[in-house]
Image: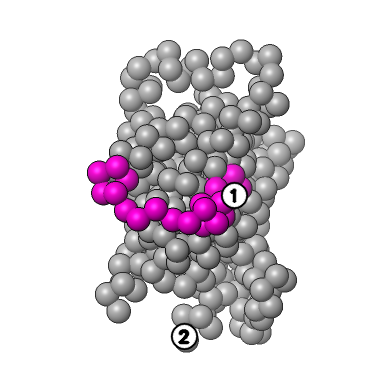
């Protein structure tokens, strides 16, 4: 029972961190290339997590477990993170976070198709509510938010991020039974960074030094490192702690409460009250995700 409570609290804390991270990283996404952000965050996270692992010295996982976590990192960090930052540069922070709710639908869909799991009728209603909630938010752009082709491009990148992340967390869940969350986070991050190193020349060939805007301004670099520390320990690490201690469906349900934390932060920090459609879309989407996992929660 104590482990379950820790897992629930870790998931909620991770959701709150991701919500804050989406808001704090928005200015960076507008100034820097998406891959530069993902790469810089990944390298810094490897150094930070590596220092923690050296001080704690946990038991090393098997090579099979390392391989699964590495592939999970390629998908969830190398691909999903890059697509996430591209979506963030074209859409509002709240729209991107709301779009991430579709990851819950993708995860359940993969479980149905590849693991033979089934949904009860109530869960199908939940799936419909998630899609409706996302549509309400995406069809109601914030003032000043890009629309047209740029906005559609942002939605497509967001959907790509969601799909890659859904596969990533499914792989990570199985590997977590063989290792600790801290080590798992490091190997996932390593997979993401290596994939970015390999793919960066393909995306930015001839584009010059795409990290220069970040490394040339030490104040900007320090601010980025502080945000990356928050996202690494509060977002990545705590999400794996939650997945390790509680069922994936429950962890994903709690992690999907990010839109509510975004609304709360916008209200308390920025004194911005969301319009009715956005508020309704967020609430409908989160309720839909809860319904999707109701059978697992009740059991």
Task: Judge whether residue 57 is colored magenta.
Answer: yes
Estimate the spatial distance between the alpha carbons at disc 2 and disc 1, rounded to whole Å. 32 Å
Is residue 178 shown left or right of residue 291?
left
Question: Can residue 82 be seen here?
Answer: no
Mark sitting on residue 298: 2
Q: Which residues are magenta?
A: 53-75
Q: Image quadrant of residue 35?
A: top right
Question: Can residue 56 be seen here?
Answer: yes
Quick check: 166 above or below 36? below
Q: Do labels 2 and 1 touch, CB within 8 Å?
A: no
- Please state which of residues 262 and 74 is positioned toward the viewer in this rendering: 74
Q: Nearer the viewer, mark 2 or mark 1?
A: 1
- Per the image, label 1 sits on a secondary structure element best described as helix
Mark sitting on residue 226: none
Mark sitting on residue 71: 1
- The N terminus, quarter of image: bottom left
Quick check: 18 above or below 196? below
> What residue is shown at x 64% (from left), y 71% (from top)?
111
- Please state which of residues 234 and 256 is positioned toward the viewer in this rendering: 234
Residue 211, given in percent of the width and then of the height, sits at 51, 20
> What residue is shown at x 66% (from left), y 84% (from top)?
121
> What residue is shown at x 53% (from left), y 76% (from top)?
293
- Per the image, label 2 sits on a secondary structure element best described as helix
> What residue is shown at x 66% (from left), y 73% (from top)?
115
Magenta segment's dominant SS is helix
- Please state which of residues 129 and 177 is positioned toward the viewer in this rendering: 177
Task: Judge whether residue 134 is colored magenta.
Answer: no
Quick check: 273 above or below 294? above
Is residue 266 shown left or right of residue 128?
left
Q: Image quadrant of residue 169?
A: bottom right
């Amino acid at each position: 029972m104590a482990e379950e409570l820790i897992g629930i609290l870790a998931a909620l804390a991770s959701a709150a961190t991701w919500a804050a991270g989406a808001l704090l990283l928005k200015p960076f996404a507008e100034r820097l290339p998406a891959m530069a952000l993902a790469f810089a965050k990944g390298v810094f996270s490897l150094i930070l997590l590596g220092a923690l692992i050296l001080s704690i010295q946990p038991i090393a996982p098997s090579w099979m477990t390392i391989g699964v976590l590495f592939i999970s990192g390629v998908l969830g960090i190398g691909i999903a993170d890059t697509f996430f930052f591209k979506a963030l540069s074209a859409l509002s922070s709240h729209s991107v976070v709301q779009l991430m709710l579709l990851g819950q639908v993708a995860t359940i869909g993969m479980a149905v198709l590849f693991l033979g799991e089934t949904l009860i009728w109530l869960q199908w209603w939940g799936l419909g509510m998630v899609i409706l909630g996302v549509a309400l938010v995406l069809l109601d752009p914030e003032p000043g938010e890009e629309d047209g082709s740029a906005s559609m491009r942002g939605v497509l990148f967001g959907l790509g991020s969601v799909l890659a992340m859904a596969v990533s967390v499914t792989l990570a869940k199985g590997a977590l039974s063989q290792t600790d969350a801290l080590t798992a986070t490091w190997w996932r991050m390593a997979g993401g960074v290596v994939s970015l190193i390999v793919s960066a020349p393909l995306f930015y060939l001839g584009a010059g030094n795409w990290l220069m805007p970040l490394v040339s301004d030490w104040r900007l670099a320090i601010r980025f490192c502080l945000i990356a520390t928050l996202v690494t320990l509060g977002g990545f690490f705590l999400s794996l702690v939650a997945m390790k201690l509680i069922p994936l469906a429950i962890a994903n349900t709690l992690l999907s409460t990010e839109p509510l934390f975004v609304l709360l932060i916008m209200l308390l920090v920025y004194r911005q009250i969301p319009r009715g459609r956005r508020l309704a879309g967020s609430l409908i989407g989160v309720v839909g995700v809860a319904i999707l996992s109701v059978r697992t929660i009740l059991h």
